[in-house]
Amino acid sequence: MKVYEKNAPDCECEELHTEVIAKKREAMPDESTLYDLSDFFKIFGDSTRMSILFAIDGEPMCVCDIASTLGMTKSAVSHQLKILRQSDLVTYKKSGKNVFYTLADDHVKDIIEKALEHIRE
Amino acid sequence: MKVYEKNAPDCECEELHTEVIAKKREAMPDESTLYDLSDFFKIFGDSTRMSILFAIDGEPMCVCDIASTLGMTKSAVSHQLKILRQSDLVTYKKSGKNVFYTLADDHVKDIIEKALEHIRE
DNA sequence: GAGATAGTTGAACGGTTGTTCAACTGTTTG
DNA sequence: CAAACAGTTGAACAACCGTTCAACTATCTC
């Protein structure tokens, strides 16, 4: 059974376990799925956005109150809310001069909960 | 019932729902927890690292084979493996000149699976 | 309509981050 | 021990990203 081969593409190695590589390549998700996944996690990878998600969990909050809760400017919060909006992680409702934001669904909380479990080990 | 107050700290707003803010501040996780959480998600927020995690799932792989599978240099992969190592997301075993990496535990897969569910909506 | 306030937005700045490159360590083999 | 190869590492560069600032829209009130 042949296991090694010389000069496989895209790698400066000279000896490779080509069967393993072929098998793994087969099992890998599409490139677009990998990008979607990492883009999704990128949203959570910022402490400001994470704080916002916790803040607006349960009871909706207006931008000004979120800013005050986090000790940040309205502008900074609004920029992050835009990103959360574009990722469909939050929904909002206008009420006079205020805009009240809240979590889009419980899916988001599930994922954060899983991560919290992992961290506490 | 008093609901508004002027000039709350850290916010240029003049009228604030102070009760909501107090309640939310109470319910928020520690600042360190928020940083730990976002740092954790930051690891997943890169498509190279995401690809590596899928590649080394199940059967362990050496650095050279990972590089070949992803079409990247050993150096670039090694840099990312270092980050995954420091986050305890992967474990490794030396075998002669090779170093074989694999997932640290099934917890990681659970979280990615949850995210995949969310994306497919 | 004028003034005040909530929220959004685009440009700019500074810090972060991923890849490249070159040099290095460590192991195997002749 | 010398050559070859797997893997790691630090510096440098470029691209990306979050906050700030200033200007803007929209709504409410007088």
Image: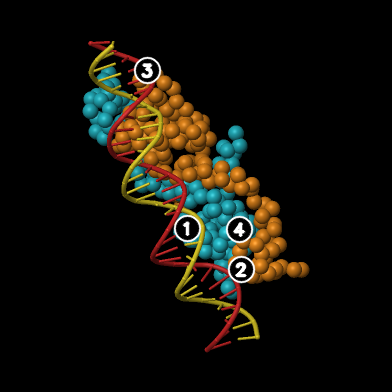
Chain colours: A cyan, B orange, C red, D yellow
Among the 4 quarters of the image, the one containing residue B48: top left
Mark number displayed over residue A71: 4
Q: Chain of mark 2?
A: B
Earlier-in-chain disc, 3 versus 2: 2
x 53%, y 58%: residue: A90
The secondary element bearing badge 4 is classed as: loop
Mark in the foreground, 4 or 1: 4
Q: Which residue is mark 3?
A: B96
Quarter of the image where the C terminus of chain A is located: top right
Say which chain tag 3 marks: B
Q: Residue at x 44, y 22 (%)?
A: B93
Q: Is residue B46 left or right of residue B68?
A: right
Is residue B117 in view?
no
Q: Report if residue A5 is visible in the image.
A: yes
Q: Along the line of sight, which residue is nearer the eye, D12 or B79?
A: D12
Answer yes or no: are tags 4 and 3 on the same subunit.
Answer: no
Q: In the rendering, which numbered label is found on residue B13?
A: 2
Asked whether the residues under marks 4 and 1 belong to the same chain, the reply is: yes
Characterize the local packing of mark 2: few (<14), some (14-19) or many (20 or more) Cα atoms within 10 angstroms: some
What type is the residue that disc 1 sits on?
Ile
Residue type at mark 3?
Gly
The reply to whether dot 3 and dot 1 touch (C-beta < 8 Å) is no
Numbered mark located on residue A83 in the image:
1
Mark 3 or mark 2: which is in front? 2
Q: Do discs 1 and 2 belong to a common subunit?
A: no
Q: Position of residue A111 (x, y in %)?
A: 54, 45
As drawn, is A106 to the left or to the right of C28? right
